[in-house]
Image (spheres, helix red, strand yellow):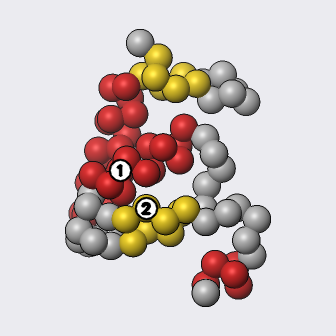
Amino acid sequence: STSQIEATTGRTFTHAEIRRHALQLASALHNTRGLRPGFVAGVVLANRPEMFITFLGINVAGGIFSASPRLYTARELRR
């Protein structure tokens, strides 16, 4: 069954797809970035299903999700 619908494109995601993508992200964070539990991940994404998948993946990896507004400049994000 459909879990989320992306309003702009109409693309749908099932619970299984969301879980699979989140687990892939968590694995990549550990295996390619070497991140360990407790890391803080700053995320700049639009409010779309990918944001939720990213949130879940970071949490599965033991990280802390920290969203930043997309309108912030690079200088503001470095603070």
Which of these two is toward me, 9 or 46? 46
Return the mark for residue 22. Answer: none
Q: Residues within 10 Å of mark 1 (few under 14, many from 20)?
A: many
Residue 47 vertical position relative to residue 43 in the rendered view, above or below: above
Up/down of 3 relative to 58, above or below: above
Give the residue at x 32% y 36%. 20
Q: Which residue lies under the disc numbered 2?
A: 65
- Vertically, is 52 above or below 76? above
Which residue is depicted at the point 23% across and 71% down?
A: 36
Question: How far from the left and from the top, in percent, is residue 74?
Answer: 70, 79
Left or right: where 31 falls relative to 22? left
| Residue at 39%, 33% in the rendered image | 18
Quarter placement of the N terminus: top left
Using residue 76 as the reference point, say whether residue 26 is left or right of it.
Answer: left
Identify the residue at horizontal 43%, vertical 68% (top origin): 41
Residue 30 placement, left or right of 25: left
| Residue 57 picture location, percent across and down | 35, 50
Q: Is residue 55 visible?
A: yes
Upstream in sequence: badge 2 or badge 1 = 1
Q: Which residue is mark 1?
A: 57
Numbered disc 2: secondary structure = strand
